[in-house]
Amino acid sequence: MSESATDQTFHKVDAFLKAALTERDLAARAKLLGKAVYWNEMLAKAQGLPYRSRT
């Protein structure tokens, strides 16, 4: 049985955060954190939860 899209997105956010914690290069860390924030916002939007819009 496959995971739902929500579970896959949650795991993607978790993976970006874990990678950012181990990254030494600040630019790469910032990029990983940016991806985690983006996917977390998409997850919140899909679930109908409040999120901070960038517009």
Image (cartoon, rainbow, N blue to C red):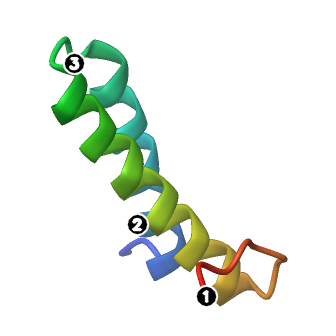
Question: Which tag is nearer the camera, tag 1 or tag 3?
Answer: 1
Please say if the residues under marks 1 and 3 sit with CB atoms less than 8 Å apart: no
In-front residue for pair 41/25: 25
Determine the secondary structure under disc 3. Answer: loop
Residue in the image at 54% along x and 78% along y:
42
Q: Compared with residue 48, is residue 36 higher up or lower down, i.e. above or below? A: above
Three-letter amino acid code at disc 1? Thr
Distance from Cα at disc 2 to Cα at disc 3: 22 Å
In front: 50, or 1?
50
* Residue type at numbered disc 2: Gln
Quadrant of the image occupied by residue 19:
top left
Q: Secondary structure at mark 1?
A: loop
Of labels 1 and 2, earlier in sequence is 2
Query: Residue 6, position in %: x, y?
Result: 54, 74
Label 3: which residue?
A: 23
Which part of the image, by quadrant, shows the N terminus? Answer: bottom left
Q: Along the horizontal axis of the image, is 35 left or right of 48?
A: left
Residue 55, quarter of the rendered image:
bottom right
Point out residue 48 in the picture as x, y percentages from the top left corner: 79, 88
Q: Residues within 10 Å of mark 1 (few under 14, many from 20)?
A: few
Q: Which mark is residue 55?
A: 1
Q: Which residue is labeled 2 in the image? A: 8
